Amino acid sequence: MTRKKQEERELCADLVKVQWENNSGSLQSEWAILSDISPSGACLEVEIPIEPETVVGLQFASEQCRARAKYCRFDKVNYLLGVEFENGYRWSRRRFKPEHLTQFRLRRVKADD
């Protein structure tokens, strides 16, 4: 059963530094493309798959936080990594405004039966 997203996500584009500990305990780091964001989470494009439930550190231009990987799936050339922010972090434009942020929000569209 999948949990329905309660918040609208805003399309954006910016570079984010992602750090996490891999299965062998080594710290890994890579740049990711931030593709959408909401107050409680984000979707990133990464080149290396990251296991769900992995805690990652995110470094935005002027902000940093911790998040938990909720999914990671291959999509054409990169992996889409969905994360949920942890420790009470809530994104807002006042805290961090991505380089490219659209004025409209993504909404779920119901398929016709």
Image (cartoon, rainbow, N blue to C red):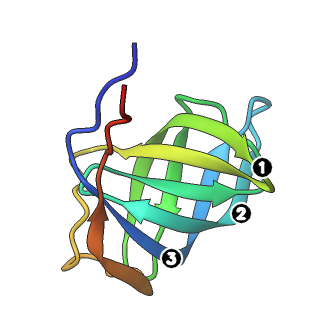
Q: Percent from the top left, x then y, of residue 80? A: 62, 49
4 vs 28, nearest the viewer: 4
- Determine which quarter of the picture holds residue 49: top right
Q: Percent from the top left, x then y, of residue 41? A: 35, 50
From the image, tell me which residue sits under label 3. 13
Tell which circle, 3 or 2, labels the residue nearer the N-terminal end.
Answer: 3
Residue pictured at 81% horizontal, 56% vertical: 77
From the image, tell me which residue sits under label 1. 48
For badge 2, the amino acid type reads: Glu
Q: Secondary structure at mark 3?
A: strand
Residue pictured at 37% horizontal, 25% vertical: 113
CA neighbours of label 1 inside 10 A, class few (<14), some (14 to 19), many (20+) = some
Q: Is residue 100 left or right of residue 80?
A: left
90 vs 75, nearest the viewer: 75
Structural distance between the alpha carbons of marks 1 and 2:
8 Å
Question: Which numbered disc covers residue 30?
Answer: 2
> Marks 3 and 2: which is nearer the front?
3
Residue pictured at 52% horizontal, 78% vertical: 14
